[in-house]
Image: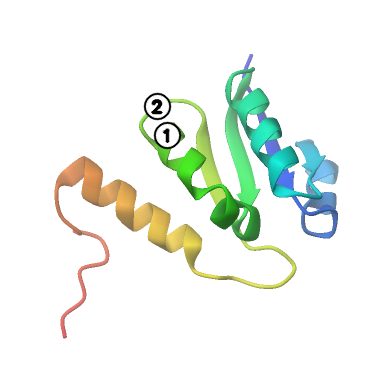
Amino acid sequence: MYRAAVIGDRDSIYGFAALGLDVFPIDDTETGSQTLRRLAEGEYAVIYITEALAAALERELNHYRLLPLPAIIPIPGITGNTGMGIRMVRKSVEQAVGSDIIFNEKD
């Protein structure tokens, strides 16, 4: 059975444990990279990652974007929304469809 996890700084992810998700507090980028790999290769189908950590691990996230599982979803941290989640959705839609059909804004 697949599971869901949340990785990022402790203050941003602490509350997700109350929802039944597995939380993995990360203090540095190297630990974040190792944890992401371990979760992605394990039984996790959905991995929520704080935008700050996702920005630091963007190259690795691009690798997982091409795979059907896990779904890696950036979430805002305690410092606020950086817009990375929307940029990743836009990039995924463009890869799948060939153009930006969701966020196509008129100038």
| Tag of residue 18 | none
Q: As drawn, is 87 to the left or to the right of 38?
A: left
Q: Residue 52: where, in percent of width, then height?
A: 63, 60
Q: Residue at x 50, y 39 (%)?
A: 60
State the residue position of label 2.
67
Quarter of the image with the N terminus in it: top right
Can you say whether 18 is above or below 105 in the image? Answer: above
Looking at the image, residue 77 lies above or below residue 4: below
User: Disc 1 or disc 2, which is closer to the eye?
Assistant: 1
- Give 86 or 53, whichever is nearer the viewer: 53
Q: Quadrant of residue 18?
A: top right
Q: 39 or 5: nearer the eye?
A: 39
Where, quadrant-wise, is the C terminus in this rendering?
A: bottom left
Report the amino acid beneath label 1.
Answer: His
Q: What element carries label 2?
A: loop
- Residue under label 1, please give it: 63
